[in-house]
Image: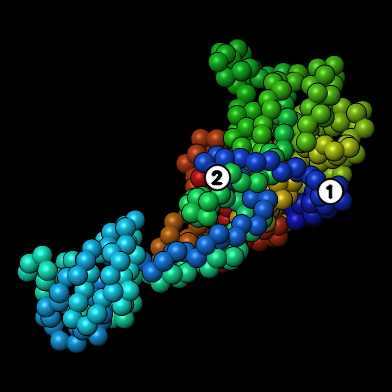
């Protein structure tokens, strides 16, 4: 059976082989709508930042040389406030009142905080504490220089980036168009969430978790409803789904008599590249492609679906978006208690993670298997238990994925 790593390699090499420069296309969004989108242009600083020598304290702009002896009384010769420079030159024995964000007057080379001063009269102030050269101010260009590349294409736009882009005058930004991802849940036992399940029925939860995962990954989910476990209905739904960039079908991919999804994929000419992964949960994961569409059959059990999505679908979406980081974010922790490994399959198990004494500690959380969403909700991580015989011992390092 294929390892997770090999499965992921197949997905990514298929995507690379199909990759074209115009895929995904670029679109322009307003800055305020750009959070978490993937940047598709390099962004350069349009001016030095800060644009001028700037006070970062409220107080008095001074010559630090005048404060060799403290307290010192200085003559106040003007006021510089944010947006309005003082237009004075500070000479020996002088200072200029100044506010945070205001331009430094010529001649001054430090700012004394107002808390360390005592105003004696409109024209004089007593300075109670000495300052170092350049204390309380930022020199022009200290953060970035005009023409510096401040952000690179491929980056996921974060909060600081939005502020940075605003400062650089970028009202609109080029980002990747979102891939459109069709989502089909399958199963004769499924009813919608606003319905009351009858005997033997359950509510469809995968559509909603997949929807959230697709959004989080940066793509646009399109819900195609529930496909029933018969060829006609699956053909109808899967036929529609193949018109999208990615088609995700949950359920109907294991060994049961009514697991017909892979059959219908093949009928439609989907080239199936794998249909099993040595992973627990998530073994019956199907991946294939047809034309410009990537196709996944995700195992029906709710946690299996999530894990398979995370390991295989999310990296593909990130690749289509031309994001610089495609892989899952794997962290390391020290194991609290021994955990049994499986020589056949790598396992991803709900776990509890805590941060103590400078590092992460992890232990598995109680759960009842791959449909136990309540157990998963009590956990805050998925521990990755490697495929091998024996135990992962307490004190050993284990990899984990953080759940949000
Ligand atoms: P399957 O892969 O179709 O054999 O489904 C495996 C298990 O997952 C069964 O217990 C299904 O009832 C359950 N399941 C399948 N699809 C969903 C869904 N959309 N929401 C919740 N549970 C599901
Ligand atoms: Mg089923």
Residue 114 is situated, as x and y percent measured from the top left of the image, at 18, 66
Label disc, if present, on residue 58 of the rendered structure: none
Q: Residue at x 51, y 45 (%)?
A: 404
Mark 1: which secondary structure?
Answer: loop
Crowd around label 1: few <14 · some 14–19 · many ≥20 (10 Å) = few
Q: Residue furthest bottom?
A: 68
- Write down the residue under mark 1: 20
Please identify, in this view, whether the residue under mark 2 or under mark 1 is nearer the observer.
2
Q: Tell whether label 1 touches label 2 (CB within 8 Å).
A: no
Q: Residue at x 80, y 23 (%)?
A: 240
- Residue 1 in the figure: left or right of residue 317: right
| Alpha carbon distance from label 2 to label 1 | 28 Å
Q: Residue at x 64, y 50 (%)?
A: 39
In front: 332, or 126? 126
Of labels 2 and 1, earlier in sequence is 1
Crowd around label 2: few <14 · some 14–19 · many ≥20 (10 Å) = few
Residue 263 vertical position relative to residue 368 in the rendered view, above or below? above
Mark 2: which secondary structure?
Answer: loop
- Residue 381 in the figure: left or right of residue 114: right
Q: How is the image coloured?
A: rainbow
Residue 217 vertical position relative to residue 328 in the rendered view, above or below? above
Residue 354 is situated, as x and y percent measured from the top left of the image, at 44, 56
For label 1, being within 8 Å of ligand 1 is answered no
Residue 353 is situated, as x and y percent measured from the top left of the image, at 48, 54
Q: Is residue 301 visible?
A: no
Q: Residue at x 67, y 53 (%)?
A: 41
For label 2, being within 8 Å of ligand 1 is answered no
Label disc, if present, on residue 171 of the rendered structure: 2
Residue 344 is situated, as x and y percent measured from the top left of the image, at 75, 53
Residue 182 vertical position relative to residue 308 in the rendered view, above or below? above
Q: Is residue 291 visible?
A: yes
């Amino acid at each position: 059976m294929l390892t997770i790593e090999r499965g992921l390699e197949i997905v990514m090499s298929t995507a690379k082989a199909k990759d074209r420069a115009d895929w995904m296309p670029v679109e322009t969004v307003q800055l305020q709508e750009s959070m978490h989108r993937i940047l598709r242009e390099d962004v350069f600083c349009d001016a030095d930042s800060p644009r001028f020598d700037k006070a970062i304290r409220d107080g008095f702009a001074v010559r630090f040389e005048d404060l060799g002896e403290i307290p010192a009384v200085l003559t106040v010769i003007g006021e510089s406030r944010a947006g309005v420079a003082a237009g004075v030159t500070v000479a020996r024995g002088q200072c200029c009142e100044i506010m945070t964000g205001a331009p430094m007057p010529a001649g001054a080379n430090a700012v004394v905080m107002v808390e360390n001063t005592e105003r004696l009269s409109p024209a004089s102030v007593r300075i109670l504490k000495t300052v170092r050269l350049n204390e309380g101010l930022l020199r022009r260009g200290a953060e970035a220089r005009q023409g510096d590349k401040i952000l690179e294409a491929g980056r996921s736009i974060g909060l600081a980036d939005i502020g940075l882009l605003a400062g650089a005058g970028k009202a609109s930004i080029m980002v990747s168009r979102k891939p459109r991802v069709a989502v089909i849940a399958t199963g004769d036992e499924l009813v919608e969430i606003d319905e009351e399940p009858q005997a033997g029925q359950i509510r469809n939860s995968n559509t909603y978790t997949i929807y959230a995962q697709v959004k989080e990954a940066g793509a646009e989910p399109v819900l195609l409803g529930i496909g029933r476990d018969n060829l006609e209905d699956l053909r109808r739904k899967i036929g529609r789904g193949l018109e999208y960039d990615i088609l995700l079908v949950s359920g109907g991919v294991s060994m049961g008599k009514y697991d017909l999804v892979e059959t219908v994929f093949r009928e439609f000419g989907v080239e199936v590249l794998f249909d099993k992964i040595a992973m627990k949960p998530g073994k019956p994961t199907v991946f294939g492609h047809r034309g410009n569409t990537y196709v996944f059959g995700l195992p029906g059990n709710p946690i299996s679906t999530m894990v398979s999505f995370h390991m295989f679908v999310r990296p593909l979406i990130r690749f289509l978006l031309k994001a610089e980081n495609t892989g899952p974010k794997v962290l390391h922790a020290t194991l609290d208690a021994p955990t049994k490994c499986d020589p056949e399959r790598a396992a991803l198990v709900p776990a509890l993670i805590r941060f103590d004494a400078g590092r992460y500690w992890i232990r598995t959380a109680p759960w009842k298997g791959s449909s136990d969403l309540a157990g998963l909700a009590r956990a805050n991580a998925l521990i990755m238990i490697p495929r091998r015989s024996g135990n992962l011992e307490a004190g050993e390092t284990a990899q984990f994925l953080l759940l949000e």
